[in-house]
Amino acid sequence: EPPLGSAGTDDIGIITRKMLGRPIDLLTDNVPEWKFELEAGKWRTYSVEDCMALERYWKVFDAATQAGTSGDNVPHVAKLRLMRKEARIDFAAQTCQVGEGRPRPLIRELKEASWLTNAYFFQAFKAALERSGVEVSSAPADMFDFRFNQDFRNVKDDGRELVRG
């Protein structure tokens, strides 16, 4: 089997890595959330890193459908690693299959951005340093890795002790 994200000429409908656009900019206001159905009515959100990967592949599918491509010629299947496992995503069917498991429903949600964004954080950080007399000339991505940011404002405490590292 070819490596994940690569395809031969017989793989019609496969989205290859060569088709992908530039990486997702985490300083944009809206980074879509991707979720899969864990069990009936219970959805689980992918990590920011996995959402970024799914979004890059989805943009290829979306661009092809917007351009009027139809049928089997639409690149709609992505093979990539999600949650550290090999997965097959069918954007036309909106499903995700991990290993030999059953295909599970998949949804993409565009959440409206609040004021607390990566861009806002960086502007506040930059302003604080400039007030201290330090000029910030580096790009945000050169200073911070925004992939692992989490918003805990709406998380309910379930009593577990959380440990990092």
Image (cartoon, rainbow, N blue to C red):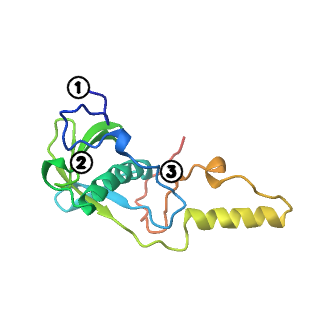
Which one is closest to the eye, mark 2 or mark 1?
2
Residue at x 82% of width, y 67% of height: 131
Q: Is mark 1 on a helix, strand or loop?
A: loop
> Mark 1 sits on what residue?
1
- Height in image: 119 above or below 96? below
> Mark 2 sits on what residue?
75
Q: How far apart are marks 3 and 1 (CA)?
A: 30 Å
Q: In front: 75, or 106?
A: 75
Q: Which amino acid does label 1 sit on?
A: Glu
Q: In front: 11, or 150?
A: 11
Q: In front: 7, or 143?
A: 7
Which one is closest to the eye, mark 2 or mark 3?
2
Residue 155 picture quarter: bottom left
Q: Which amino acid does label 3 sit on?
A: Arg
> Badge 3, how many Cα within 10 Å: few under 14, some, many 20+?
few
Q: Can residue 83 be seen in this view?
A: no
Q: In which quarter of the image is the N terminus?
A: top left
> Mark 3 sits on what residue?
147
Going from the N terminus, do you reach mark 2 or mark 1 first?
1
Residue 37 picture quarter: bottom left
Residue 82 x, y percent position in the rendering: 33, 42
Q: Residue furthest right?
A: 133
> Badge 2, how many Cα within 10 Å: few under 14, some, many 20+?
many
Q: Is mark 3 on a helix, strand or loop?
A: helix
Residue 132 x, y percent position in the rendering: 84, 63
